[in-house]
Image: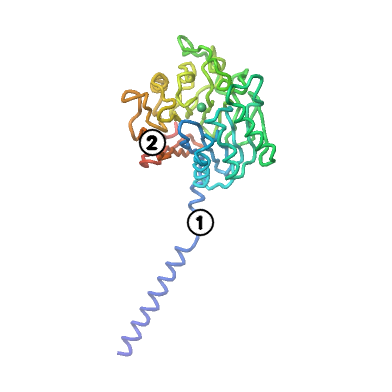
Amino acid sequence: MIRKNRNSKLWRIALCSAAAALAWIYAMPPATGNTESAAKGAGLQVYFVDVEGGQSTLFVTPKGQSLLVDTGWAGFDGRDAGRIVAAAKDAGISKLDYVLLTHYHGDHSGGLPQLAERIPIGTVIDHGENAPAPEEGTEPIYQAYMAVVASGKVKRLSPKPGDKLPIPELDPTVVSAAGQVIDHALPGGGQPNPACEGANLAPDDQVENPRSLGIRMVFGKLRILDLGDLTVDKEALLMCPANKLGHVEILVVSHHGTYTSSSSALVHAIAPRVAVMDNGGKKGGTPNVWQTVKSSPGLEDLWQLHYSVEGGKEHNVPDSFIANVDEIGDAASYFKLTADSDGSFTVVNSRNKYQKVYRAR
Ligand SMILES: [Zn+2]
């Protein structure tokens, strides 16, 4: 009996020691450090935030530098600012290093004051003064932005076409600003552009969209283009007769897929693998732009932030590739793109968790 008791006691000690050892192993940090941070730090993160037919796209680099392109709308109790802050939190950042305002329309710059109240912002980048002839309705938006600058909360930077933005991991080059475009081809560009023939390049009569501050970014082997709401006449200056932009892998479809942007001279020549359209249910997403993007050579997928009512059955992508499928509603579903410097990337639809991996080429 004594011996049996002694044996069971030894077993108990052995079991306890094994359990303690296992607990210690599990408590140990993995050799690579915090796995979540390691995963988050592994690549570029891009959030296509739903601001109901405006733009707001958040880029967070592996080293944690951030660039937000546009802020969505003002009003709605800070709806868009809240969605942007949620994306920033998901990306693991508590400050926006750079906020780029493509132009002074309400769906792009309107949300800045509310955003600045909710999260620290380093520098705001814009296309310059709201001049010489401010478009009707833009002055209050511009002045609200100027008030944020005057408060000392943010710095201001107004670059010119050809300038680089100080975000080394994204290497952004300004390709358009204040109605001007680059006067030279970017590395990888300069080839004759057959898509200019027959393209609709009629000038647009609005003031502010053609002034959009557009950038081309490079992350490893990945090139990303975001031209704000730049119009077809400015696209012609960038793309005809020679393609100054070269190819890109990821295109943020200009002007939410409205017909005044996205000529075939632009889209078919840059030939993106993936296009993301930040349309609303009843804003942008026009059938002719949808068709131009879908027929672009080499396009693998178009992703839409909303089902386009105007597009109907024929001009919408399958539901899996749409973040918000209901005609009305405020679901705020978004896309998250993560990219590796080897050129591979993944897009995830937050609504249904549908994801697609795009392998490096
Ligand atoms: Zn817009």
Residue 78: mark in rendering? none
Q: For mark 2, what is the residue? A: 324
The way the protein has been coloured in the rendering is rainbow
| Kind of residue sitting beneath label 1 | Ala
Upstream in sequence: badge 1 or badge 2: 1
Of 281 and 18, which appears nearest the observer?
281
Q: Is residue 242 above or below residue 247?
A: above
Q: For mark 1, what is the residue? A: 31
Residue 69 seen from this side: no
Locate residue 142: give its quadrant: top right
| Kind of residue sitting beneath label 2 | Asn
- Which quarter of the rendered picture does the C terminus lie within? top left
Q: Is residue 57 above or below residue 160?
A: below
Q: Specify few, some or many for label 2: CA neighbours under 10 Å numbering under 14, 14-19, or 20 or more.
A: many
Is label 2 in a helix, a strand or a loop?
strand
* C-alpha gap between disc 1 and disc 2: 40 Å
| x and y, in percent, of residue 102 in the image | 57, 28
Q: Are marks 1 and 2 in contact (CB under 8 Å)?
A: no
Q: Is mark 2 within 8 Å of ligand 1?
A: no
Q: Specify few, some or many for label 1: CA neighbours under 10 Å numbering under 14, 14-19, or 20 or more.
A: few
| x and y, in percent, of residue 308 in the image | 38, 28
| x and y, in percent, of residue 207 in the image | 58, 19
- Which quarter of the rendered picture does the N terminus lie within? bottom left
Locate residue 67: give its quadrant: top right
Residue 81 seen from this side: yes
21 with respect to 58 (left or right): left
Of 176 and 287, which appears nearest the observer?
287
Of 94 and 338, which appears nearest the observer?
94
Is label 1 in a helix, a strand or a loop?
loop
